[in-house]
């Protein structure tokens, strides 16, 4: 089969690789009909996530048709059309039973490695480094889905791939980020990043009752999309903290969502400082957005971190974070918790996520697509590959 | 009652029992005392500083919970059960989200679990295995002998807080020094056993909770040199 393989920073290729097979009783094999490039794939593309190995198959947001199931998978049958949760979870451990699926104890074969780095291992994630399990990802014609009895969700009839493929990751991530804000009537929510997660977080904030949403980015087409769904916008090259205070009567947003993560574009002296520190390996993550969010958020507000961070950042204003009494909520998405709810929301017509899709492409276009998406070329919001076409 | 089982200190004991003053503690108390005397005699600001430092050192030695002790792994930090209670003993603990009876049944069958399932940690159960002690639902202890050496492997189970599964404490004890000199030295200086023990515990938890051990062995990649091992690959 064909698959998108990582060979090093900014080096992805479409290779011919062996087909996946059932390895464990709770596995399934999926024929992938749609698979996306997620913003967090760019952290792998740029070499920010350690423990990648040349030849790893990428992709954690995908859906398709069930081709084959292991003997312990009894609730899904071959031929069913399903969307797959990006984190891999067993469904039976302490964490899964408390709906904290991305903290599963039993899905990561490289748990010892993650334990060394973070103290405790999180769940595995498809196609997201050996720290996250080393599982082959879904940017391929076929993919093996471990713990398929809890990680695959049948798609309601009448919904298109382009509406639901995001439910397994970015849409669920965004919804969770908005839910973390515990939005109250009258609340203003600021969202950094107008990629798919940021845009869906804005949709979710409105769905959950936000009065106002303020979007922060610099790419014109992305800011335009944000305005299209009712958000006010701030250019991130301006003084973001001052702009947010100005827009909120000097108080600051009630909740701030970081939908950018470790590769934020800094500006000015601080941006240059971050780049130097990164080049000297004295920091691992560029935390521009976190700094701004901590400074801008109103006292006692909520900080929801959906963007991915990996290591040990420099100059994080922990003093402001603590003294302002902010509530911080974080985590990789507990996708299994949100997918059924999101499929219901989409089926009811309250949200049609397909508006973010700008580039439906055959799988062979992956190298070009990664390049353009990474360069934030204007107009590139979301890439969806159709591995069975072309 | 369970706390009386061999090698399983109670939670309270694990918090408080840091042992009596050992040689290092005595040295700290002695040195600290000497610094206090020296400092008081000098009757200067430097003397005051010396006396304070000496008092602190003596207190740390007496309390047995000093940073130096922890650094040297001589005594555990308060609240931390000892992982290496003795020089020839390794312990790891995990909580398994299953009943004590289920976990006990799984460990009862562990010596017969194939290497294909357990992977490298199976080595801890390789050799002649004699069951030394069993207390249904609570304790299993085996002697594993091979090559003139061997060790004891003990599994002790206690209920977690209500609804929180079973706490499993696995101990490797009394490894005898069989094999070559190199092998003996290697056993002393490498963390291999500790890793194996941790992995054995982790894999037993995977089996008990998930019913399988997660794997990526045999999956496709662009590296191409990893053929399927459990099933034949197909070409679609």
Image (cartoon, coloured by chain):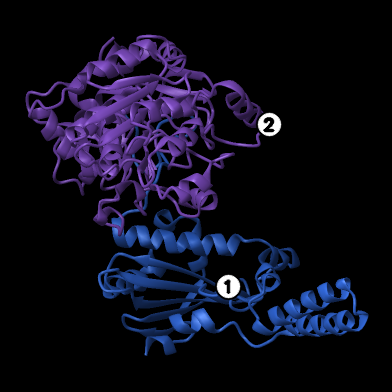
Chain colours: A purple, B blue
Q: Quadrant of the C terminus of chain A?
A: top left
Asked whether, in this view, residue A208 is left or right of residue B199, the answer is left
Q: Secondary structure at mark 2?
A: loop
Q: Is residue B231 visible?
A: yes
- On the image, numbered disc 2 is attached to which residue? A280
Q: CA distance from mark 2 to mark 1?
A: 36 Å
The quadrant in which residue A225 appears is top left
Seen from the viewer's position, the closer of residues A320 and A312 is: A320
What residue is at 12 percent from the left and 32 percent from the top?
A345
Residue closest to the far right? B42
The quadrant in which residue A22 appears is top left
Q: Is residue A227 above or below residue A94?
A: above
Q: Are marks 2 and 1 in contact (CB under 8 Å)?
A: no
Q: Position of residue B172 (x, y in %)?
A: 53, 73
Seen from the viewer's position, the closer of residues A245 and B205 is: A245
Q: Is residue A227 above or below residue A314?
A: above
Q: Which chain letter goes with mark 2?
A: A
Q: Position of residue B99 (x, y in %)?
A: 26, 71
Could you confirm whether marks 2 and 1 are on the same chain?
no
Q: Position of residue B24 (x, y in %)?
A: 75, 80
Q: Position of residue A132 (x, y in %)?
A: 43, 41
What residue is at 27 percent from the left and 22 percent from the top?
A231
Q: Is residue A37 above or below residue B218?
A: above
Asked whether, in this view, residue A160 is left or right of residue B79, the answer is left
Residue B77, numbered label: 1
């Amino acid at each position: 089969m064909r698959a998108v393989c990582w060979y090093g920073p900014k080096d992805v290729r479409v290779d011919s690789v062996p087909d996946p097979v059932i390895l464990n009783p709770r596995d399934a094999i999926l024929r992938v009909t749609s698979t996306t490039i997620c913003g967090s794939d760019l952290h792998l593309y740029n070499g920010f996530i350690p423990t990648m190995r040349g030849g790893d198959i990428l992709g954690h947001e995908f859906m398709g048709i069930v081709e084959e199931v292991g003997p312990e998978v009894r609730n899904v049958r071959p031929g069913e059309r399903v969307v797959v949760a990006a984190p891999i979870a067993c469904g039976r451990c302490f964490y899964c039973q408390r709906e904290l699926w991305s903290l599963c104890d039993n899905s990561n074969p490289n748990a010892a490695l993650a334990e060394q780095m973070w103290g405790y291992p999180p769940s595995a994630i498809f196609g997201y480094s050996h720290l996250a399990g080393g599982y082959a990802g879904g940017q391929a014609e076929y993919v093996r889905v471990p713990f398929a009895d809890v990680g695959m969700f049948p798609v309601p009839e009448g919904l298109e791939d382009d509406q639901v493929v995001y439910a397994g990751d970015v849409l669920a991530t965004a919804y969770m980020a908005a839910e973390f804000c515990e939005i109250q009537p009258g609340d203003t929510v600021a969202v950094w990043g107008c990629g798919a997660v940021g845009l869906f977080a804005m949709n979710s904030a409105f769905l959950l009752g936000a009065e106002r949403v303020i979007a922060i980015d610099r790419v014109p087409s992305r800011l335009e999309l944000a305005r299209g769904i009712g958000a006010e916008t701030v250019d991130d090259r301006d003084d973001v903290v001052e702009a947010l205070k100005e827009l909120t009567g000097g108080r600051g947003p009630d909740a701030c969502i970081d939908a950018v993560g470790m590769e934020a574009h800094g500006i000015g002296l601080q941006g240059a400082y971050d780049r130097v520190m990164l080049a000297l390996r004295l920091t691992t993550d560029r935390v521009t957005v976190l700094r701004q969010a901590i400074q801008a958020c109103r006292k006692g507000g909520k900080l929801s971190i959906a963007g991915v961070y990996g290591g040990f950042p420099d100059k994080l204003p922990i003093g402001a974070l603590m003294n302002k009494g902010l509530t911080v909520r974080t985590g990789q998405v507990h996708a299994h918790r949100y997918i059924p709810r999101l499929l219901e929301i989409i089926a009811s017509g309250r949200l049609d996520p397909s508006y973010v899709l700008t580039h439906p492409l055959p799988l062979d276009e992956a190298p070009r697509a990664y390049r353009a998406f990474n360069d934030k070329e204007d107009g590139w919001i979301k890439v969806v590959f159709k591995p069975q076409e072309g | 009652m369970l706390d009386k089982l061999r090698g399983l200190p109670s939670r309270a004991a694990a918090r408080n029992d840091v042992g009596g003053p050992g040689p290092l503690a005595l040295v700290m108390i002695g040195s600290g005392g000497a610094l206090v005397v020296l400092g008081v005699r000098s009757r200067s600001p430097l003397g005051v500083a010396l006396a304070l430092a000496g008092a602190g050192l003596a207190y740390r030695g007496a309390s047995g919970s000093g940073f130096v002790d922890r650094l040297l792994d001589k005594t555990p930090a308060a609240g931390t059960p000892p992982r290496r209670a003795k020089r020839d003993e390794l312990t790891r603990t995990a909580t398994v989200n299953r009943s004590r009876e289920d976990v006990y049944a799984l460990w009862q069958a562990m010596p017969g679990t194939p290497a294909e399932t357990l992977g490298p940690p199976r080595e801890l159960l390789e050799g002649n295995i004699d069951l030394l002690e069993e207390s249904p639902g609570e304790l299993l202890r085996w002697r594993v002998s091979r090559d003139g050496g061997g060790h004891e492997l003990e599994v002790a189970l206690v209920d977690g807080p209500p609804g929180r599964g079973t706490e499993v404490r696995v101990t490797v004890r009394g490894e005898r020094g069989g094999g070559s000199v190199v092998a003996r030295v290697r056993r002393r200086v490498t963390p291999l056993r500790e890793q194996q023990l941790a992995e054995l515990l982790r894999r037993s938890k995977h089996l008990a909770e998930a019913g399988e051990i997660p794997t990526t062995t045999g999956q496709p990649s662009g590296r191409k040199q990893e053929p399927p091992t459990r099933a034949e690959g197909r070409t679609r």
